[in-house]
Amino acid sequence: NLASIAGLASYLLFIAYFYLLNLNPLGPIKYVSLAVTAFLLYLAIKHYRDTELEGFGKFNQLFMPRVIFSFVYSSLIGMLVYLHTSMLDVSVVEFVIRDGLESVGEFKEVMLNYMDKDEYQKLIDQYESLSPSVLALTDFQSKSITTLVLALIYSLILRKSPPIFNEGE
């Protein structure tokens, strides 16, 4: 349930970044969306521990259900981004390509110190051939990995073992 809310919230922020703020929704601004998702993920783990596990939970008990959160959230936002960029507004993809090429162009000299011209040209070609499906898949992958890492951290923080002895004993 919270995973779906996180996916919809991220999509609404994606729309707001592009249409209201005129920013690349998959650029650094996407980390603002991550704060919303991180908060909802924390609430989901805490709620699960407190209600389903009676206030106690081992790491694996807390982490494994969050894998489902990560999958639902990432799949939903990936699907919505794909549908939006392929059916509603292709200009988002064009904007992301243009923004990426500008970023790469700004640091061309620095990048050429670490890669040869063929690798640099390959990077340019990859940006130029970006499609809605690649854009959505990339977003899905980054959000999956990020939420899984957050789930690991939160599961470690929120784990709680039951007391060995009851207070009345």
Image: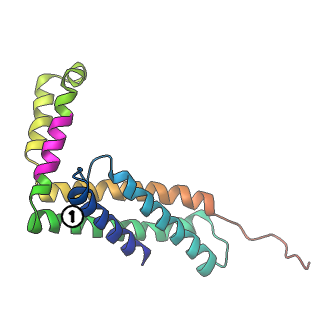
Viewed as shown, does residue 64 lie left or right of 122?
Answer: right
**In this view, 135 is above or below 58:** above
Q: What residue is shown at x 33% (from left), y 50% (from top)?
A: 29
The image shows residue 101 at horizontal and vertical percentages of: 14, 38
- Stretch in magenta: 94-103
Which quadrant would residue 48 be assigned to in this image?
bottom right
Q: Quadrant of residue 77?
A: bottom left
Q: Residue at x 29, y 67 (%)?
A: 12
Left or right of 165: which side holds 60? left
Q: Residue at x 59, y 63 (%)?
A: 59
State the SS at label 1.
helix
* Residue 41 percent across, percent down from the top left: 48, 66
Quarter of the N terminus within the rendering: bottom left
Mark 1: few/some/many CA within 10 Å (<14, 14-19, 20+)? many
Pointer 1 residue:
81
Q: How many marks?
A: 1
Image position of 85 with respect to 49: above or below: above
In the picture as drawn, the residue positioned furthest to the right comes out as 169
Image quadrant holding the C terminus, namely: bottom right
Residue type, numbered disc 1? Val
Check the image and tell me how it is coloured. rainbow
